[in-house]
Amino acid sequence: MIARPQAARWLRLLAVDDDLPLGLETLARTAPFEPEAVTGDARPVLTPEILERLKRFDALVERFRLGWPEGLGEAENRELPHAAPLVLLDQALMALEAWRAEAEPLIQLEHEQRAREAEWLLLRDLAGALGSGGLRLEPFGREQGESVGVRGVIHALPLDALPAPEVFPALLTRLLHGERRLFLLAVGREEPLAALAEQVAALHGRPVTLPEWASGTGQEVADKAAGRLRITSAWIREIQERLLAIGARHGVAAWIQAVRHLKWYFQAARTVGSGQALHRFEGWVAPGIEAAGVNERLRRAGVRGLASLSDNGPGDPPLTLVNPWWARPFERFPRLLGMPGRDEVDPSRVLAVVAPLLFGYMFGDVGQGAVLFGMGVAMRRHFEAAWLLMSGGVASIFFGFLFGSLFSSEAILPALWLHPTAHPLAVLAAPLAFGAGLILTGLGFSALGAHWRGHGSAWWRHEGGVVLIYLGALLAFFTPIGYDLALLGLGIFVVVNGLESPGHLPARLAHLLETVLQLGVNTFSFARVGAFALAHAGLSQAVMTLADLAGGGVAGGVVLLLGNGLILALEGLVVSVQTTRLILFEFFVRFLSGGGRPFRPLPPPD
């Protein structure tokens, strides 16, 4: 059950310059690798020449990306040559420039066709709105009205726009509702029409220009627009097929992917060690990785290089927690304080038992625990902490059987231990005993960490008396031997500290008093576990009482459903917070500082 953080191993990779990006990617994908800044003969990987080419490439991609048909961004199975980053960028630029020269006229043509397609869609929507209103569409602004200075206009507006044409009494207006937008028809003189156009523009609308063929009933115009849509859409599809063929011929997607990998490399590596023929990466790999396996993966990837591993690297190595699958979700508790140090106990395996027990004791109900477990099962693929919910649900079911509670009712299941509200003192006392055992476990972890650091004897000289005093105080509630044990611990503390530094004995005695009082407060803090168990039982009884007052039947069932839902939402959150608080401030404070350096492996490129 006792685990210790594992130190990462130091790795050095020597490779030819052309294969450095592939070597780093292979390490990131196969052997979790955290690069370290190279010292001494380091050189930056992002040179001014490379940066200038990256800017040119990004400008080309940004300019023409909107013209790419769907599928052009998917990488083909094309083998690109191994080359130095600068050479690879030059080849990518040449390929993209060649594609641009051939594809740019087609892209421009596609833009024109899409603009026409948008106009035909607008007219089809307008025709639909006219059909529902029984109107005919005739081109406005033609000769019939120009002799008297009057003309008609049509504006298209968003569906949520609210034009206010009543402020233009000199205009004759009508508002039509289309499928995708509103259409405002207006007839009048130039000045009020110009004012209306300004208001429409403020509402993100636009004028509709009617072609010569757009006349007739709504159905007639809709049929004409549909015919032109079919022609335009077919033309767009043909252009896209030709663009796809051009993109495949020039390998555009493969080159874009290659440049994206280079960008990942530039950001991840930053500097490399520079030699005459070989260059190097340095960094850390996860514990348990061996050089033979790494070199085999590099060979399979085609990397011309060699990796060497050592257990001793420069500075303090990063640490990682190594636990079985059932304890890994509980690693998030110590990580709230930081990574446990190299000579500190990793409490994740202990927490896999302690945390569910604390939660389940405060939330003891078979039915509600089953709901929590079911929620955890449903979310396990999308929510990393789902296992915490599942384990808490199982513990709630266990204590629900002990308390005889099923969906707030204590009349269905017999209590295998007791009903909380009937025996409140026992419910409060059990968590105190559990908390004392957990605090003693924390003190034991502190002693073990001191032993790993080589300070085990010093820990026992200074803290052994504290442990005996605490144990004696606990036993004094049951047997007079506890007083003798506490006095023995006090005597040991006074003798050891008096012999080591007599002048500091009063200060250390004051510190001893503070420590013992703190241990007592930490122990009594676990009484809140019993208090929340009683609160849960009391709230459950209140729900059952309200259900009885509702008269049973459907009304009572609704009250039970809402009451249990409230308990799950409210108490589930409160109990989770209390469990976390007890673990952090009553357990971890004894042995865990969280001053270790976490191992952060480099994420591979997308």
Image (spheres, rainbow, N blue to C red):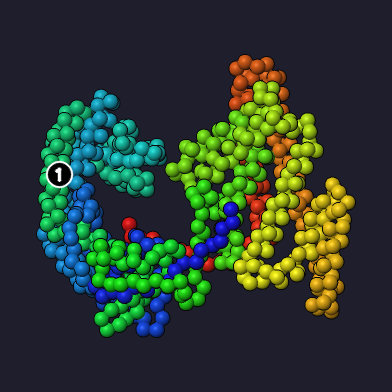
Q: Position of residue 421 (x, y in %)?
A: 76, 32
Looking at the image, residue 518 sits to the left or right of residue 597; the answer is right
Q: Visible in this render: residue 132?
A: yes
Dividing the picture into quadrants, the one containing residue 563 is top right
- In the rendered image, residue 450, in percent from the top left (x then y), is placed at 65, 67
Kind of residue at badge 1: Arg
Q: Secondary structure at mark 1?
A: helix
| Camera-side residue of 215 and 305 | 305
Q: Is residue 275 above or below residue 22?
A: below
- Image vertical order of residue 107 relative to residue 267, above or below: above
- Residue found 26% across the figure and 63% down from its top: 301
Task: Write the residue at 75% across / 38% down.
Answer: 427
Q: Look at 79% across and 33% down and name the residue there.
A: 423
Observer-nearest of 420 and 51? 420
Q: Quadrant of residue 372?
A: top right
Whether residue 567 is visible here, answered yes or no, is no
Q: Give percent across and percent down for residue 451.
A: 64, 67
Q: Is residue 259 left or right of residue 578?
A: left
- Front residue (pair 416, 329): 416
Q: Which residue is mark 1?
A: 237
